[in-house]
Amino acid sequence: MSGELDRRRFLQWTFAGTLLGGCPVFADTFPDRLVIGGESLSVGHMLRDGHEFPEPTVRTRHDVVIVGGGLAGLTSAYLLRGEDVLLLEKEPQWGGNARLEERYDRSFAIGSAFLHEDDEAARLARELGLRPMPIEDWDGTVLAGRFIPNTWRDGLNELPYRRSVRAKFKALREDALSWKLEDEAGKLDQVALIEVLGPYGQEVLQWWHTYCPSNWGGRADRIAASVAIEELRWMAGDDESDGRATWPGGIGALSSHLAERLTPVMGERMIREATVIRVVPQNDRVEVTYVRDGVVTAVSAKTVIMATPQYISSRVLSEVPDDQLAAMRRLRYAPYAVVNLVFDRPVYDKTYDTWCPGARFCDVIVADWVERRHGAALDRHQVLTCYAPLLEEERRQLLTADGCRKLAQKVVVDFQGLLPQTRVEPIEVRIYRRGHAFHIAQPGLGPVQWRASTPIGRVSFANADSQNLVSSAAGAVNAARRAVREIEGFL
């Protein structure tokens, strides 16, 4: 940290939680107000640990089996709704990383939050009759107890640093806008962002250390420089509108809408709480085995779409070429917690998404932002969504209730330390944890990703990790469209 940031502000920024340590954060009643949720992993862990499941005879036959009921799996089922499709999802709810919850008549995300108005996910939503609601607001940042709107635009003049430090932020912005990415992309794909940020100082690095984990699964030393530079060009470019859109509940609204549309068409061929343990390609069929309520069931299909992350596909799919299996297992995944703070009154609405360097969470989203922007009367409860990704080596913290409680409590303390108006006790704290939330946009990922997602006979892959360096709703929809094209010849 540069000595140019005055000491008082530095302490406020970096040690906000420590300074608030003496303030009561409903410590006595916190466990009663905390709700912990997460993935169902017991069967998956048995598979990982080598448990031998029985091999039942095939019960039913289908044209297509789709493994995974997240956004990619639901989209695949929607595109194939005229076929005999069986959709299997290990969780009790549809949506995967794109899910919503509701509390006090408020919808909020426990995963992905927004899309871009012109991307494939937005086009699918419009096709379904679900109109994306524009966000119309550039992200702000809280530093040293100050809110800075439009961080990478006019906000650079308001950063609580000396002029020389602000000049480094501006220099990065100008350099990023002037780079010819079509010439630089190959090189920037191969290096970590930290190698590009070296000349711009610790304050700039700290900001990106906050931004990168929430979007791409790792700090600046683990993320390909290309994705961050492309993002910065978008945030600092000439467009007046940021082009993002969402709904109450984030992308979970799209997943829910898809599931509602599919249920009358597919009926009992949509099965939840069904964990797939084997996918075995054969000459003219693919056999799929899953566990539900302790019962092991086998089905057969002409073709299969694996709408699951590659770390799952690589464990359940047999007959994978050695080099492809190695590529599948080179993908890395970020552990992630989303902490929703529920208040009995409006608390914060300065911007849709606020970045918070120095806090235990990366950013906080106003869950009812688009409702407020579109004139809804919201004078009672409010939910604020804090995104708290972890590093890979911190994954174990999410395995225990005590680890989740400590993480959630630190999020609350740091949120209360942001601004005077945020020193409010939530009436409820809801933490949702995922051990392998999304793939890390690591340097050199492109060729590995391409090899990992190559179809294997009658099996195709449809997950955001098989499509783009960056995990996104558009990537999930694009992956589904590609997988459906790949299997059409088998139907």
Image (cartoon, helix red, strand yellow):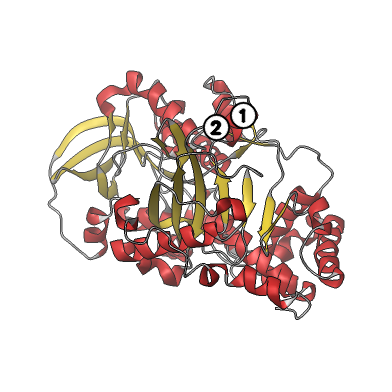
For disc 2, the marked residue is 247
Relative to the observer, which residue lies in front, 44 or 190?
Answer: 44
Determine which quarter of the picture holds residue 180.
Answer: bottom right
Q: Are marks 1 and 2 in contact (CB under 8 Å)?
A: yes
Q: In x, y percent, where is residue 416?
A: 53, 57
Give the vertical position of 309 relative to 369 (above or below).
below
Relative to the observer, which residue lies in front, 470 or 154?
Answer: 154
User: Quick check: 145 left or right of 59?
Assistant: right
Q: In x, y percent, where is residue 450?
A: 55, 54
Give the residue drawn at x 63%, y 26%.
Answer: 374
Q: In x, y percent, where is residue 201?
A: 76, 74
For disc 1, the marked residue is 133
Determine which quarter of the picture holds residue 458.
Answer: top left
SS assignment at label 2: loop
Give the residue drawn at x 42%, y 70%.
Answer: 394
Q: Quadrant of the C terminus?
A: top left
Give the residue drawn at x 70%, y 78%.
Answer: 1
Q: CA distance from mark 1 to mark 2?
A: 6 Å
